[in-house]
Amino acid sequence: MQNTTQLFQNGTGAIVVPGLFDGTLTIKELMENGNTGIGSGDGLDGELIIIDNKPYKIDGDGIVSIVNDDFTVPFGNAHFADYEDVSVTPNLNSKDMSDVIFKHKPFENTQFSIKLHGQFSHVTVRSVYKQTKPYPNLIQTAENEHVFEGDNVTGTIIGYYNPSPFSQIAVKGFHMHFIADDLSIGGHLSKFSGFNGHFGIQLFNDFKLRLPVQNNDFLNHNFSKDDIEGSINKTER
Ligand SMILES: [Zn+2]
């Protein structure tokens, strides 16, 4: 039976900060833990968004494709979708979204997912190019990312909220990926405005974290000198 109260995660935010970009779990294995999710590929190969069991990748040029079962991820979240519809203000903007959510739901200290589907008057997304070894760190990789802007686009956001006490596990606050229904634009979401459509929230009780214990670069890395929180905040906003 599908457990709809569990959030699964492969890797952590802290692991990708110093450039530990090896894919350590296949997309097939990730999706055994959910039909919905987000992530990145081996070598930080683009931005992933999983909707209704379909794993889409948006590469550094903004090209969308569906990845094969053996595509691997250094970081990924997945869960089985069971969203509760909430009514939000018309023409919602990303900067007002937290206030709107926490007015309805006192979930500031826990993990949950959001799914938005509908019309956006504007979205700003971005994506990174696959890196090769020796890998640069996350900040160096993000310097070469591409930003894409979309007007009057219909699409889906999948996002996860990670409360600040667990800020090094994932992105603090909301980590959201977007894809248009017609696959014309997608990526890591920076901001949106003028949203009208369905807004769903799904709360989790359980968090299952998989660490890449077969990966020697991870096992031997000294994390004590990495500015993990600073790097995540700088690159994932
Ligand atoms: Zn992202």
Image (cartoon, rainbow, N blue to C red):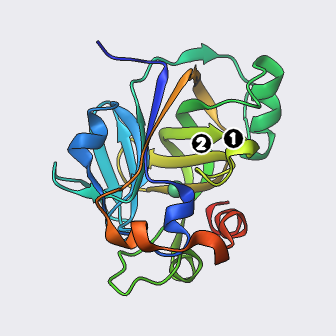
- Secondary structure under the numbered disc 2 in the rendered image: strand
Q: How many tags in the picture?
A: 2
Dot label at residue 194: 1
Q: Quadrant of the N terminus?
A: top left
Dot label at residue 36: none
Q: Residue at x 22, y 57 (%)?
A: 71
In the rendered image, is residue 61 in sight?
no
In the rendered image, is residue 115 in sight?
yes
Q: Residue at x 41, y 66 (%)?
A: 219
Give the side of residue 152 with respect to residue 62, left or right. right
Q: Horizontal and vertical percent for residue 214?
A: 28, 59
Amino acid found under the numbered disc labelled 1: Gly
Q: Quadrant of the C terminus?
A: bottom right
Q: Relative to residue 99, is residue 64 depicted above or below?
A: below
Residue denoted by label 2: 120
Q: Residue at x 33, y 70 (%)?
A: 216
Tell me the distance, in whole angstroms, between the alpha carbons under discs 1 and 2. 5 Å
CB contact under 8 Å: marks 1 and 2: yes
Q: Residue at x 31, y 62 (%)?
A: 23
216 and 194: which is toward the camera: 216
Q: Horizontal and vertical percent for residue 196?
A: 63, 30
User: Splitting the image into 4 quarters, where does residue 9 fall?
Assistant: top left
Q: Dot 1, crowdedness within 10 Å: few (<14), some or many (≥20)? A: some
Q: Is mark 2 within 8 Å of ligand 1?
A: no
User: Splitting the image into 4 quarters, where does residue 186 fall?
Assistant: bottom left
Which circle's residue, 1 or 2, is located before the other in the chain? 2
Amino acid found under the numbered disc labelled 2: Phe
Furthest toward the bottom, the residue is 134
